[in-house]
Image (cartoon, grey):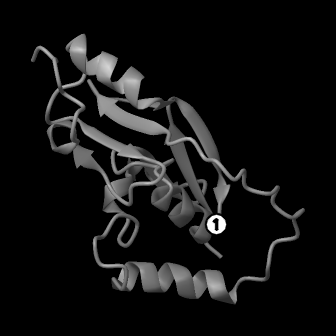
Amino acid sequence: MAQWFCRLMGDEIGPLTSAQLLEMARSHKLTPEDYVRKGTEGNWVGAYRVKGLFDEDASASGISKIMTAVSQAPPPEAEPAPPVPKQHVEDWYCICKGRKLGPMTFEVLQALACEGQLQPSDRVWTNLMPKHHAAAEIQGLLRGATT
């Protein structure tokens, strides 16, 4: 089974299974701009280069390969996950000036835009949004911003 490692905000995380890496990408904890490597001796590459992690088509062969490897792996022995709270706050994230920021509220993200730190082309997303969007595409985000 492949083991993966990733660098997130200066920290190295791993080893991770293919399923864990895919889940991190789907939940936006891993972005295309983060670095990953396969195994302890692999070269660090941009996560966007791992076929299937960020493809638009969920049936891409890379995802199929990852999911096949996952389905053949024995189930992990872990404690059951804690119950999900009924009311979930929407956490926002962004990549501005080459740095991944978040989680934060929408109001904090708006403040970054008003201060000129968040540009219209910067990527933003939420834990509830399936993919990244340019800040300019998010309704109400750049209102009053000076860019």
Q: Depth check: 5 or 143 in front?
A: 143
Q: Quadrant of the N terminus?
A: bottom right
Which residue is at a point 47% across and 58% down the rendered structure image? Answer: 25
- Mark 1 falls on what kind of element? loop
Residue where numbered disc 1 is placed: 17
Mark 1: amino acid = Thr
Pinpoint residue 12: horizontal percent, then vertical percent: 59, 39
| Residue 101 visible in rendering | no
Question: Of 66 and 59, which appears nearest the observer?
Answer: 59
**Position above or below: 98 against 88:** above
- Residue for point 17% across, 25% down: 143
Judged left or right of residue 104, residue 129 is left
Identity of the residue furthest to the left in this view: 147
Please tell me which residue is depicted at 31% across the width and 40% down the height of the picture: 124
Q: Within the image, what quadrant is residue 113 found in?
A: top left
Percent position of residue 2, x then y: 60, 71
Depth order, front residue of 57/90: 90
Could you tell me how many numbered marks the image carries? Answer: 1
Q: 101 or 66: nearer the eye?
A: 101
